[in-house]
Image: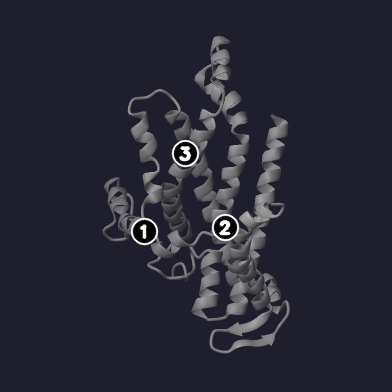
Amino acid sequence: MRYSPYLYVAPFFVLFAIFGLFPVIYTLWISLHDWTLLGGQEAFVGLDNYAYLLFEDTRFYNALFNTLGMFVLATVPQLLIALLLADLLNRRIRFRGFFRVSVIFPYVTSVAATALVFGQLFGRDYGLINYVIELVGLPPVNWQSGRLASWSAVSIMVDWRWIGYNTLIYLAAMQAIPKDLYEAAAIDGASRMRQFWQITIPMLQPTILFTVIISTIGGMQLFTEPVMFGGGDYDGGSQAEFQTIAMYMFSEAFGRQDYGYGSAVAWIIFVVIILFSLINVLFVQRIRSAV
């Protein structure tokens, strides 16, 4: 049949239009209104929500600053460690299969369980990390009160969960690299480190770009880890030290029940993700052309 291929793929596009595309477009419409849960659509305000958000709302820029800070602290070490772990697991080591399976365990662990464990580790009074800090003669740290301390704690939670996921992606890409390249380099006298930088890294550039973009999307939408770290509070600490823009969106929409303003924040998050993804693509392309 001439139209049979379209019929085969039609269910996906129908479901996507109903449950994906329509909610996104409807959220844009809501962002142009003063919209509350009880009152519903009260008044059309146009771009007033966006104007206040971009030019007057200092809480939004505080949340954006927190998000960018935790994104840098979490993503850079995360991808570097994942790359090194993948290179290690790609070698002939003992119990290689066991270690390859083990790295994915944090990813499949419940986020609630992860937050509970790390909440105990970073506890102010009886936390294990503060106990170790005091053993070396340093004062204990209130991990939820300081900006840098809270950023570090949340970033460690994020890294612990996602390093194994990125490691397996890099490992799969490394195994697709022809072994002949390494054998020829070894014959020419290239060390393992030189092979890594001159063969592995250039061959992994598309995969690295993929993980950078995915990490950017996840970092800009960071929500679960800081919320669980703060005990389920959307405010991100007493002074909003670790409130992300996703937490701020939920605080406005479901805390203050201002769905119009919360929808505007959601669309700004979308724009920020697009901008940072484009910056990442351009940055990686410049590195590729330089190499």
Q: Amino acid at mark 2?
A: Met
Using the rendered view, name the quadrant where residue 42 is placed. Answer: bottom right
| Mark identifier at residue 214 | none
| Mark identifier at residue 168 | 3
Q: Which residue is mark 2?
A: 220
Q: Which residue is mark 1?
A: 115
Residue 276 in the figure: left or right of residue 120: right
Residue 267, position as x, y percentages in the image = 64, 67
| Total count of labels | 3
Q: Is residue 271 above or below residue 173?
A: below
Q: Nearer the viewer, residue 36 or 197?
A: 36
**How far apart are the two marked residues, 3 and 1, measured between alpha carbons?**
23 Å
**How far apart are the two marked residues, 2 and 3, measured between alpha carbons?**
22 Å
**Residue projecting furthest to the front:** 1
Q: Circles 2 and 3: CB distance less than 8 Å?
A: no
Q: Nearer the viewer, residue 60 or 176?
A: 176
Q: Amino acid at mark 3?
A: Leu
User: Looking at the image, which residue is at 40% across and 69% down?
Assistant: 232
Q: Residues within 10 Å of mark 2 (few under 14, many from 20)?
A: many
Q: Is residue 57 visible?
A: no
Element marked by disc 3:
helix
Element marked by disc 2:
helix
Q: Is residue 104 visible?
A: yes
Q: Residues within 10 Å of mark 1 (few under 14, many from 20)?
A: many
Q: Circles 1 and 2: CB distance less than 8 Å?
A: no
User: Looking at the image, which residue is at 63% across and 60% down?
Assistant: 13
Q: Circles 3 and 1: CB distance less than 8 Å?
A: no
